[in-house]
Image (cartoon, rainbow, N blue to C red):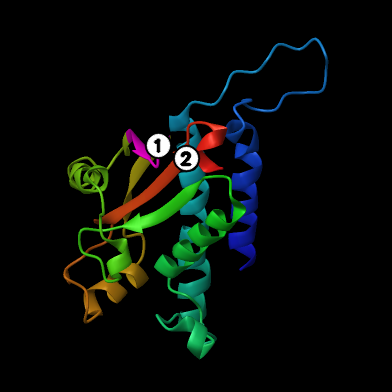
Amino acid sequence: MRAQGFGLGLIIGMLLMWASGQGLPSATGKNLPEPPCIPATAATDYVHSVIQADRTFYTTEIVERMQVRGTAVASEHWKERGMLPLPAQFLKEAGLLMRGDDRGIRVRLLSQWPINKDNRANTDFERTGLSEIMVDGGRPYTGVVTQDGASYFQALYPDKAVSQTCIGCHNAHPNSPKKDFKLRDVMGGILVTMPLSQSSHK
């Protein structure tokens, strides 16, 4: 998808300097002061902002528009049937592309009511985070976790229903544990994980 590729390229480009601990790039010059590093909270905000914008545009301007016109349909089995991926699958595929980049940046969906069991919370941080963002849907739940001896900053952002497509799919799906979602409801979370040092993702 063209929008997906652009968004991922923008994310990686913005964060290359952060990932190497050098901060934001500055104009060329030998005597310019060293720019400050980007805080981890700001870096994950950047990633989430681009991912969320990409998926919202894909949902409202591609999936919904093409389905209304009858030119294409989004399907859970999109690969086999040659159809459009669902918005949740769009985000999942974006996350898989990030893993392939080997920068240590990870993005995935989480939910207390997952249709796909891969989206269940697996850690104490994820379980607590899902509970917290259900209460406060404004800012993400954040913290530092250790995985395989390396430190990572994690931010779990509320994932709200932005369209009737999201609601209709979840409420009608036979495997959905919750079938009464409404617009703007928090349906789960988007987890962004970033290494706190270069060695974390080597």
Q: Is residue 162 above or below residue 9?
A: below
Residue 142 part of the magenta-drawn span: no
Alpha carbon distance from label 1 to label 2 = 14 Å
Q: What is the quadrant of residue 132 in the picture?
A: top left
Q: Residue at x 56, y 60 (%)?
A: 97
Mark carried by residue 91: none
- Quarter holding the C terminus is top right
Q: Residue at x 65, y 18 (%)?
A: 35
Q: Nearer the viewer, mark 1 or mark 2?
A: 1
The crowding category of the residue bearing disc 2, from other C-alpha atoms within 10 Å (few below 14, some 14 to 19, many at least 20), is many
First to last magenta residue range: 143-150
Q: Nearer the viewer, residue 79 or 55?
A: 79
Q: Is 186 placed left or right of 54 in the picture?
A: left
Report x, y in % for residue 150: 43, 36
Q: Residue at x 52, y 31 (%)?
A: 197
The amino acid sitting under disc 2 is Met
Report x, y in % for residue 87: 43, 68
Q: Nearer the viewer, residue 9 or 105?
A: 105
Q: Secondary structure at mark 2?
A: strand
Q: Secondary structure at mark 1?
A: loop
Earlier-in-chain disc, 1 versus 2 = 1
Report x, y in % for residue 170: 27, 72
Q: Is residue 81 above or below residue 111?
A: below
> Which residue, given by chain and number where applicable, does mark 1 sit on?
149
**Residue most toward the front?**
149
Q: Is 48 placed left or right of 123 in the picture?
A: right
Q: Nearer the viewer, residue 155 or 121?
A: 121
